[in-house]
Image (cartoon, helix red, strand yellow):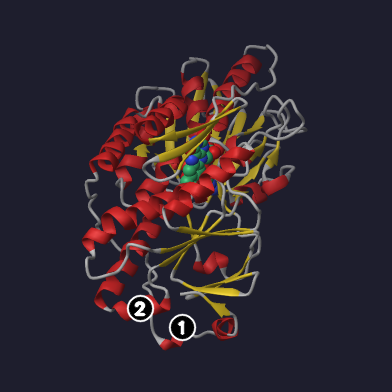
């Protein structure tokens, strides 16, 4: 037992769905003291990030104070600091400030980041969507290109109003649909001098179908809805290079743009590489069915940070529902260990997956059944599928209802450009980098 604590001490890294669920479950026991460490002082609700990016919601709608959420538990302390390394043998983590936290149990739930798969220029020039900060940057970029193009419409020839989304999974589909609706319903009214009715929204994926994890029929439905909204699909095409002013595709096409949204895949957060633990696909920590790490007693890895085996021999998907359920399960296993009992293998209750495609369509896969949903039913189903994720964050339900209300009322959200996107856009000739010149030999898209 850690001398500083009179009870068993559990250190949790990450206040996402997994870390929060684990902390909440442990907090119910008077046998443990919990330290929850996160680099932010808030829990971010990732399923609503694209609504933040498309200015349908504000930051406070998608982020909840960790302290407030956990304030009623006297045995939970929250520390806001970046963890930079972990020593799994002693169950100790070290922070960027040089402090260390040692526990009888160590729970690693630090989530994920964008995986650029080594694509040239992607890290520097594209905008991922995995955190509140990234969503704010993207929103700022979208609003900035509209303001710039309004001032100087000739910038449209440089791709000011072209948007390229990389990745045709649920995140890419949801962003594409929301962006198409934002431009059609909001920007067209706010920028009457710009011809934005037919925006240049391109969705690129190297696979031949959208929405990989969904049943086959959903792929075509998503494609139909997006095309109806004016999104141009480039399937079976890889992104070769992302430059500051264009994207180069594997078929030789170059799309001039200042807004490349990266939804191309996930990699475990950088801490995974510094944790001295076995890693697998996506750089995630390999765990046993009971969520512990082999050969490291008392160490658990959860959610997007871990490859969690499923009974069919595959690994469970990176989903909020998986993260939340395994957080609760890990806490129960820890309490069982403390009580001298035995741990049990994690059982995931699959409530289904769902993707909204703009304001009026959605596709859901629940069990073996696929559902295509329109209008208010789509919103109701989203609430149903996400109800558990929202439990404990009541304000998120309110935010979602506000968002739905805005959608149906066609009301205009406030488009405040707060310049979260620090890198101002350079429209000058000096942008012609070596790679840009090379790309000018490629087929160009307007
Ligand atoms: C745009 C988008 C939409 C999504 N939509 C859905 C959906 O509709 N339904 C669904 O089920 N899932 C959805 N997901 C997936 C779901 O959000 C994730 O699977 C889930 O958030 C994973 O939870 P987690 O607790 O493992 O990680 P996270 O929620 O990412 O939490 C990790 C936490 O760790 C903290 N952290 C990371 N590194 C450090 C460090 N070094 N030091 C300190 N703190 C650190 C982070 O700040 C963060 O708070 C979506 C994801 C995205 C990006």
In the image, what residue occupies the spot 34% across and 69% down? 145
In the image, what residue occupies the spot 55% across and 75% down? 254
Q: Which residue is mark 2?
A: 155
Q: Position of residue 188 (x, y in %)?
A: 27, 60
Question: In what element is the residue under mark 1?
Answer: helix
Q: Position of residue 147 (x, y in %)?
A: 27, 69
> Considering depth in this image, is 161 or 14 the residue closer to the camera?
161
> Considering depth in this image, is 60 or 334 the residue closer to the camera?
60
Q: Position of residue 109 (x, y in %)?
A: 57, 37
Q: Where is 125 relative to 113, above or below?
A: below
Give the alpha-carbon distance from disc 2 to disc 1, as whole Å.
13 Å
Quadrant placement of the C terminus: bottom left
Q: Which mark is residue 208?
A: none
Quadrant of residue 337 within the rendered picture: top right
> Considering depth in this image, is 180 or 338 the residue closer to the camera?
180
Mark 1 Cα within 10 Å, few/some/many (few <14, many 20+)? some
In the image, what residue occupies the spot 64% across and 63% down? 238
Please report contact status of discs 2 and 1: CB closer than 8 Å, yes or no: no
Quadrant placement of the N terminus: top right
> Considering depth in this image, is 281 or 190 the residue closer to the camera?
190
Q: Which residue is mark 1?
A: 431
Question: In what element is the residue under mark 2?
Answer: helix
Mark 2 Cα within 10 Å, few/some/many (few <14, many 20+)? some
- Residue 136 seen: yes
Instruction: Answer yes or no: disc 2 within 8 Å of ligand 1.
Output: no
34 horizontally vs 211: left or right: left
In the image, what residue occupies the spot 23% across and 70% down? 193
Q: Where is 397 relative to 183, above or below?
A: above
Q: Of the two numbered discs 2 and 1 on the same chain, state the one appearing first in sequence.
A: 2
Q: Position of residue 87 (x, y in %)?
A: 66, 42
390 horizontally vs 153: left or right: right
């Amino acid at each position: 037992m850690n001398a500083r604590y009179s009870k068993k001490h559990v250190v949790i890294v990450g206040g996402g769905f997994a870390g929060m669920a684990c902390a909440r479950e442990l907090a119910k026991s008077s046998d443990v003291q919990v330290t929850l460490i996160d680099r932010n002082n808030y829990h971010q609700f990732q399923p609503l990030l694209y609504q933040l990016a498309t200015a349908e919601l504000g930051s406070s709608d998608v982020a909840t104070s960790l302290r407030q959420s956990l304030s009623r538990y006297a045995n939970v302390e929250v520390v806001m600091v970046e963890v930079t390394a972990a020593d799994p043998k002693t169950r100790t983590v070290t922070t960027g400030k040089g402090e260390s936290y040692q526990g009888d149990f160590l729970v690693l739930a630090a989530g994920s980041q964008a995986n650029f798969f080594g694509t040239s220029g992607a890290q520097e020039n594209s905008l991922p969507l995995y955190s509140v900060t990234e969503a704010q940057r993207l929103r700022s970029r979208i609003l900035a290109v509209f303001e710039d193009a309004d001032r100087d419409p000739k910038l449209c020839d440089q791709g000011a109003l072209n948007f390229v989304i990389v990745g045709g999974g649920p995140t890419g589909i949801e962003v594409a649909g929301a962006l198409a609706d934002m431009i059609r319903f909001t920007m067209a009214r706010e920028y009457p001098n710009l011809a934005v009715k037919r925006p240049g929204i391109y969705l690129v994926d190297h696979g031949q179908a959208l929405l990989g994890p969904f049943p086959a029929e959903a792929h075509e439905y998503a494609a139909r809805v997006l095309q109806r909204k004016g999104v141009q699909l480039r399937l079976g095409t890889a992104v070769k290079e992302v430059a500051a002013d264009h994207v180069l595709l594997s078929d030789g096409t170059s799309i001039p743009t200042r807004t490349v949204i990266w939804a191309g895949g996930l990699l475990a957060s950088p801490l995974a590489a510094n944790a001295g633990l076995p890693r697998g696909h996506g750089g995630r920590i390999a765990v046993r069915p009971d969520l512990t790490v082999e050969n490291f007693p008392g160490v658990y890895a959860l959610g997007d940070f871990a490859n969690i085996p499923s009974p069919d021999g595959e690994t469970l998907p990176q989903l909020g529902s998986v993260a939340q359920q395994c957080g609760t399960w890990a806490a129960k296993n820890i309490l069982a260990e403390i009580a001298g009992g035995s741990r049990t293998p994690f059982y995931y209750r699959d409530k289904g997956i769902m993707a909204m495609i703009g304001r009026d369509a959605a596709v859901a896969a629940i069990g073996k059944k696929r559902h295509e949903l329109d209008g208010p039913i789509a919103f109701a189903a989203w609430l149903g599928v996400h109800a558990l994720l929202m439990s404990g964050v009541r304000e998120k339900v309110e935010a979602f209802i506000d968002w739905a209300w805005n959608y149906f009322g066609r009301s205009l959200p406030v488009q405040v450009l707060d310049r979260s996107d620090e890198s101002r856009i350079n429209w000058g000739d000096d942008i012609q980098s070596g790679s840009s010149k090379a790309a000018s030999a490629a087929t160009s898209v307007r």
